[in-house]
Amino acid sequence: MPVSADLRFSDRVEEYYLSNKLKVILIEDKRSPIIVSSIWYKVGSSYEYEGISGISHVLEHMMFKGTKTMEPGEFSAKIKKIGGTENAFTGRDFTGYFQKTHKNYLDLCLKMEADRMRNLIFLQEEFKNEIEVVKEERRLRTDDNPTAKIFEKISNQAFGMRGYGVPIVGTMKDLNTISVADLKKWYLNYYVPNNAILILAGDFDKDKAKELIKKYYGGIKKAKVQDYLEKSNHKISFKNIKVEDKVSEPLVLMSFENMRFNEENRKENYVIELLMELMDGGFASRFTKNLIDDKSIALSTFISYDTYSRKRNLITIGGSPNKNISPEQLREALITEFTNLVEEGLYENELADVKSRLLANNIYKFDSVFYQVMQIGMLETKNLDWSMLDKYIHEINSITEHDLINAAKKYILKKDYIFTVIEPKKL
Amino acid sequence: MRLLSLIILFSFICDSEALSFPKIHPIKYNNNYLLVEEHTLPIIDLRISFNYGSKNDLNNKGITNLAINLLGEQLLDGEKILNHFEKIGAQYSSTVTKDTSYVGIRFVNNPSNINNISYLLNHMLTKYSITPEAFSHKKELVLSSIKSRDLNPASLVSLRSEERFLIDTGYAHPVIGYKKTIELLDLEKATLHIKKIINKNNIKISIVGDINKNKATFMISKILNKVSDNPIIEMKNNVLNYSSDSEINYIYFDSVQTHISVIFPSVTRLNKNYFNILVANYIFGGSGFGSMLMSEIREKKGLAYSVHSYLMPYDEIGLMKIGMQTQNKNTKKAIVILKEQMMKLKEAKFSDEQINEAKTGLLRSFELRFDTNKKILRTLSAINELGIFDNYFINYENGIKNVTSESLSSAIKSEINFDNTLITTVGTN
């Protein structure tokens, strides 16, 4: 399929460092008169350990609770007054903050964000309320959510309370004990310019933006960032998991350990991505076509996989069996799809169709200024260079049938995995 | 994430200082076919809206949703239309709401794609070639969704509150229907229903992206070629029948949080007081941090992660809804606060500063709503579906600007019936 593939980040991105080692990335996109101003800190749940799990996320909440120059809630109120939106997010490898406003308000956004990089105050009264809000968030997203709960359990069995085994929201036990002193320590260590990336995107004047960035961030001193993690001896266990919970159908999950992403294994990770897309990326993929449409073995299927992982991670493959099909039968059928690929190779045009889909998706990503920021921020906080986004198309196009077959063998068929079943709870 | 996205239906705001309103062009001199050209990316987004939602299901509750879901499952050359779309990198989607249904397609602009997509969409709207296997799989999926919904406290509170509040109207039942009504459906009924929905007089088309008027005209002509053109059968009007018994509707559910829903009558989108109520809702609970609800429930008391109010302006009935969730033991405390805040809303004692801030916030957020093709399409199709294309932006801007302390207070008194409130909780309380 002829798809335009000439959209490149390198045509719109400029990067540089301030003298305090704050990395600045400017993305020009003048489609509409807006700017997205964001700051990304290299800290998230994978930096945490038992006793303080969830602390990066709690700190994210506290970042809206006042600085030496601003009252609690004032940051949000000011953005709201100018019709802007703002939010924050915590992941396994990053904590990010952004404001999306009319382009006239860049000065305000940069000034307020720079202020809370160093001047946060931790009021006990505010903390007392906010930690309860975070607990409610955990109850909402995890404790009352069978799928989220099981993913937390699987990750914990695989990695323990380290790396990607630490739940982003934290355990309830740790949320009950995290203190203001813990938060201050975390903040002072990680919220420094040399541990952050400022990403600005949208319709702005570059020179003016650079001036403002220097004005507000240039005076903040760099500082040594300490790694609090001690060596862990946790070994992955492939013990099966079986639970009952409030699900409508049984849910089957197979979790395979996968390598972290780096420059050396980049191509191999893209092969895995393409393999997973081929199996479960769309209506025409093998799981849907074979297991749902043709054989009626599965009611639904899914694959959960993060290409750009900073730590060892999991590829989880699963689904719900159709009526009169057991979880074991679905497990076997899912694995057989990989075996069939290895033994029989690709269908006619299959590889070209999947590539077309991925390449088109790569174009659609440019529709949103915010999404461009997210893509770059997520890579940079994992110490991966944003310019690899431009190599993506080339890498995908170079993948062959042979690559896919090798990946299926190496990363799925020859690997042990954690087999999990959630059975519907009898109510 | 620190915040949840707030749902503000049809709240597409404009601003006097806005630099770039999307320019809307009717196609074929017909206001049912609207285009916004956006040539900076080689992407085209197209949405076909059917003036047919679950409110038109009558006794076959859930049939519209099932029928629309089946459209992409039709076969062409032995393969699903969905698969044909995917092969050319196009993204297909379909949605059914209580008032409307639509299918959408996003694709990369090139001459062969414009031809192929038009052909595939036309096939989808004219051939009705659904296999029994596709039908039974979709039916199973819907039945599974119904089971899942009944196991999710958030879905359950919404379902039960709307069933009770909208009783005896087409809006009472859930879009996906019930187990008993879905089980009674067969392929023949579904196909007949599809034929009823797909009718040129029911269809509106909105297009955004890298396409000019001529090509858009070509696409629309090709998509609608030989689509049936029958007179529309008018459905009965829906009138609110709920009468409050002032009791809280407690529903037991084994969860760690109780989900709370509060509903009371409000305005439809075309009501003359819509903008007054929109501003009131912004102050009350529609604008996240700093709103009355967020401030009292979350910021001061830490009772919930998410609390918000929003307007649900269905075509024929307008509602205002409050939603939140808190650990079971705090339910009563939360309801007391919600009631206190509702009393304040009823009294409408808002300062001029509060009202002006709300108006400014609403107006200035306008441009942020048009920064992607997807968002422009969402607005365009909403305008298209409601038939308010003429002077839409000006009317919207003036609507907000004209809100005053007096008009807001009078609108709350005349349009919101606080005595007819339904509170529903789902949890262990």
Image: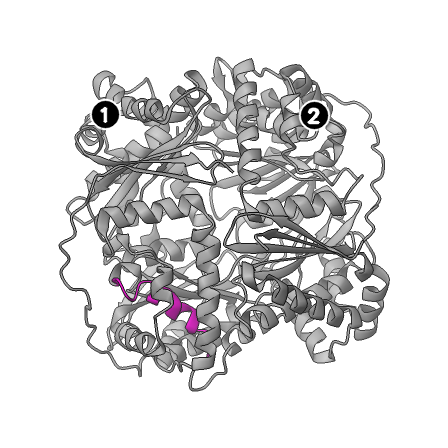
**Front position in the image: A197 or B214:** A197
Category of crowding for the residue at label 2, using alpha-carbon neighbours closer than 10 angstroms: few (below 14), some (14–19), many (at least 20): many
| Residue pictured at 53% horizontal, 28% vertical | B141
| Image mark for residue A411 | none
Q: Can residue B227 be seen in this view?
A: no
Whether callout 2 and callout 1 share a subunit is answered: no
Identify the residue under disc 2. B198
Chain of the residue displaying label 1: A
Q: In this view, does A219 lie to the left or right of A257?
A: right
Is residue A389 located in the magenta-colored stretch of the structure?
no
Magenta range:
A48-66
Q: Where is residue A16 in the image (x, y as percent from the top left)?
A: 27, 68
**Front position in the image: A21 or A252:** A252
- Vertical arrangement, residue B324 with respect to residue B79, above or below: below
Tag 2: amino acid: Ile
Q: Where is residue B160 in the image (x, y as percent from the top left)?
A: 67, 45
Q: Which quadrant of the rendered structure holds the N terminus of chain A?
A: top left
Name the secondary structure under disc 2: loop
Q: Position of residue B313 (x, y in %)?
A: 73, 50
Tag 1: amino acid: Glu
Q: Where is residue A383 in the image (x, y as percent from the top left)?
A: 23, 58
| Image mark for residue A401 | 1
Chain of the residue displaying label 2: B
| Residue pictured at 30% horizontal, 81% vertical | A220
Give how far apart the Cα atoms at labels 2 and 1 are.
Answer: 42 Å
**Front position in the image: A38 or A391:** A38
- Vertical arrangement, residue B262 with respect to residue A119, above or below: above
Quick one: which residue is furthest to the bottom in this view? A68
Q: Is residue A272 visible?
A: yes
Figure quadrant of residue A245: top left
Color encoding of the figure: one colour
